[in-house]
Structure formats: structure tokens, C-alpha cells
Image (cartoon, rainbow, N blue to C red):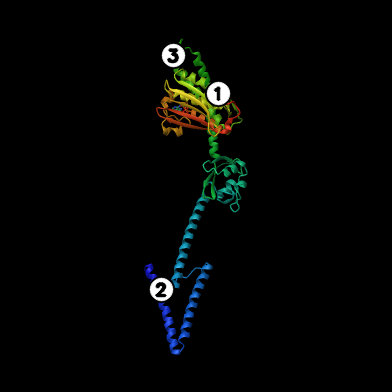
Amino acid sequence: MTVGSLLRRAWRQSVARLLLILCGAAALGLLLGAFWPLLALAAFAILAWHYWRLHRLLSQLYQRRRLRDIDGRGLWDDLEMLLHRRQNEGRARVKRLLGLVRGYRRAAALMPDAVLLVDRESGRIDWCNRQARALLGLDAHAPGAVGTAFPGNAVQGWFAAGQSDEPLIDQPSPIDPNVRLSLRLLPYSPEQWLLVVRDVTKLLRLEQLRRDFVANVSHELRTPLTVVHGYLDILDTEDYPELEPMLTEMRKQSARMSQLVEDLLTLSRLEAQEALAQREVVAMAPLLATLRREAEALSAGRHRIRVLDEARVDLLGSTRELHSAFSNLVSNAVRYTPVDGSIEVRFERSPDGGAVLSVQDSGYGIPAQHLPRLTERFYRVSTSRARETGGTGLGLSIVKHVLNLHQARLEITSEVGKGSRFACVFGPEAVAEGLPEAGGEA
Ligand code: ADP
């Protein structure tokens, strides 16, 4: 039956019942000679019955009782039936949602990571899974707040900043400092964060093993290489003219190997540091002058070289590391720019009060798809060209690590056939203020 016909049937039944009662009362009234009083009595009884049904329905709704499923025998029955269906649908929806929530919670509880639902405003932990007890010692019934779960300032500061894009790596577990944790914030709802805590002890140990291995191997290779290098230097090609091409190649390769070992040791040293032990004033004018000399020596007159000091400020950090980073960029610019190309080193202030050291060349350029991977170890755009120019494949990796230690970043822009620009961007906190303002070529 359609909704319209159901409604019509209910109306018909109700009106027919009303007319039947009124007609019955009128007929009885005529018979007994009390027409009007009996008609009024019947009308009053009908009104009272309607009020009684209304009262019954309202009290059932107020008391949240389940309504009866009665098949329509008038308007009130139909109304009760419809409300009963709504109640059933509502209950089924709630049941389904509860099932879903329970399913999610069961999945979260089974996860090997600790999962916490945390209120963004107060830092209160609204819920946590079983693993949170093992990793963080939290009581699932009264987990407390992030502040008490992680007493250290690092986690609290990170949580307050709401850094959902930056995980916090290598934090000690509050119950066992030997267990190292990585923390990640996920935006669960506008009011809550999902805090996922993972045990990364094994991963960090492996990483440490890898670093130690590379550092030890590089260190061990240093001595034999120095010996080979020394003997090769003693051998004079004039004494052995027939060996000249071989000796020249051996010298070249042993120099490359030494450079590789030195670069690997530099990277290991940089990786072992979480932050700079101390920050000194890095005098930029002499450093720029050194970069110019190095570029000129490497280029040997094959390029036009300009070094501009427009910032006329010094930086705060490590002179040794910054020199190594900048000279890597300068060396790359010389090596990847054909003869007669131009190279410009520019040191300038940035609008936010920081400073930028950029090395721009008019060289081969780098296709866009390689840019995101350039700072990976041993990543090369063209292996043959890099080998030809004597690269180790570690230069930009070193640059990235040095800049990370200075809370600076490397920006790379490049166009194939036109050239590249490598910019080291320092924040205002890395600038040593209070030096005379002036501009010009360094
Ligand atoms: P490499 O020792 O091989 O130069 P780097 O880490 O310094 O290693 O650089 C990685 C790669 O990036 C290089 O092999 C080269 O392909 C590319 N590259 C770096 N600097 C430049 C540049 N100025 N112009 C073009 N390509 C560059």
C-alpha cells in the first residue's frame, strides 16, 4: 500500500468511527427522549478518548518506552505505528554505529603501536589502547594527560605546537629510558589528536650500527690509502715513461678514493651530532674571499666568477662546517658548468631578517624530476659526468646535514641548459647583528 492510501484509510476509519458513535448516541437519545444530552455526552467521551491517547503517547515518548507496532485502526494507531518504526530505525542505526566504533577500537587495541586519543585543548588523554600500558605505563581507565605521560619538555612543547607533519623521533619511554620512541600526531577530529607512539629502539640501533660501520670502514681505509698515495707520489714518471698513463690514472683514482673516505668521515661526524656543540661568529667576509679563491683555483680561468657580499653580516654557527658546505656548492657549480660559463656567489639578507647564501651557475642544469633526490647519498643525475668531474656523490648530502645543524634549509632551482641556483636559507636567529652596513663585491 502506498503512503497516500494508508493515510486515506486511517482517515476513513477514524471519521467512520466518529460518525458511528455520534449517530448511535443520537438514535439512543431520540429513543430515550434525551437527544441533546446524549449527543453532548458522546462528543465529550470522544474528546476525552482523544486526550487520553495523546496523554498515553506523550508519556511513552517522555519515558523513552518502546511504542507498540499496531496495524492501523485509525489516526492514533497509525501515528503510533510510524513512531514505532522511527524508533526501530534509530535503534538499528545506533547499533550499527556502535558496532563500527567497537570494530575501530578493537583494531586500534590490536595495533602494535600505542594509540592515544588526546584532547587538543587540555592535553587530556580520552582513550588509549593496551599497548599504551606496555610502552608508556598508562592506566587504560585513568590515562591522565600528555604532560604526565611524558614528563619531558620536548614532548610537551611538540604537542602544544600541534606539529602533525613532523614526527618526534628518538624520545625515551617514560617507564624505561632504554626504550626509544617515535611520536606522531594525526588530526583525528577538530577537538582531538590521535597520538601514535612506536617503539623504534631496534630501528635506531640498526641505524647506529650502520653509521658506526661506515665510520669505522672509512677510518680503516684512511691509513692504507695514505700509504698508497705516498708511494705513488714517490714514483717519478720521468724514470718510468712507459708507466706514465698508468701512474697518472692510479694517482687520480687514489685521490678520488681519499676524497670519498674524507667525505664519508665528514658525513658520519655530522650525523652523530644532533645540534651544534657551540655556535661561534662565522666571519663571512673572509669566508667569501676564501670561496672566491677556491672557485678561481678550481676553474683555472675557464669561468667568469663573481662573489657578492650584499648582506654584510656574519652568521652564527660553525665556520668549519659552513665552509665545507659552501665550498661543496661552489665546487659543484664549477664542475657542472661548461667553459666560459658564469658563476655567481651572492650573500644577501632575506625579508624576514635572515640571510641567504646562493651559488648560481649558467651550467648544464638539472631536470626537475631529480631535484627532490639530489641530497641523497651517492645520488647523481648523470653518473658519467659526475665521475668525469671527480665528484664523490656525497657533496650535497654534506650540505644538507650542515644546514640542518644550523636550522637552515637548501633551496634548489634549476633549468636544463640554463643553469642552477643552490641557496642556503638561514633564519634571523642565525644572523649575528651589529656589523657595519655596506655593499659590494667581496
Ligand atoms: P657529486 O660529487 O657527484 O657532484 P653532489 O652530492 O655534490 O655529488 O651532487 C649530486 C648530483 O647533483 C651531481 O652528481 C650532479 O648530477 C648534480 N649537481 C650538483 N650540483 C650541480 C650543479 N651546480 N649543476 C648541475 N648539476 C649539479
Q: How crowded is the residue under tag 1: few (<14 C-alpha within 10 Å), some, or many (20+)?
A: some
Disc 3 residue lies near ligand 1 with CB under 8 A: no
- Point 48% across, 12% down: residue: 236
Quarter of the picture containing the N terminus is bottom left
Residue nearest the viewer, comparing 243 with 300: 300
Hey, which quadrant is residue 336 in on the image?
Answer: top left
Q: Is residue 401 left or right of residue 244?
A: right
- Could you give the CA–CA distance between mark 3 and mark 1, rounded to whole angstroms? 38 Å
Kind of residue indicated by mark 2: Trp
- Indicate the secondary structure of the residue bearing disc 1: helix
Q: Earlier in the sequence, mark 3 or mark 1?
A: 3
Q: Which label number is shown at residue 380? A: none
Residue matched to label 2: 11
- Could you give the CA–CA distance between mark 2 and mark 3, rounded to whole angstroms? 115 Å
Residue matched to label 3: 244
Residue nearest the viewer, comparing 132 with 317: 317
Q: How many marks?
A: 3
Position of residue 71 measured from the top left corner of the image (x, y, whole percent): 42, 72
Q: Earlier in the sequence, mark 2 or mark 3?
A: 2
Which mark's residue is nearer the viewer, 3 or 1?
1
Residue nearest the viewer, comparing 191 with 177: 191
Position of residue 103 measured from the top left corner of the image (x, y, whole percent): 49, 54
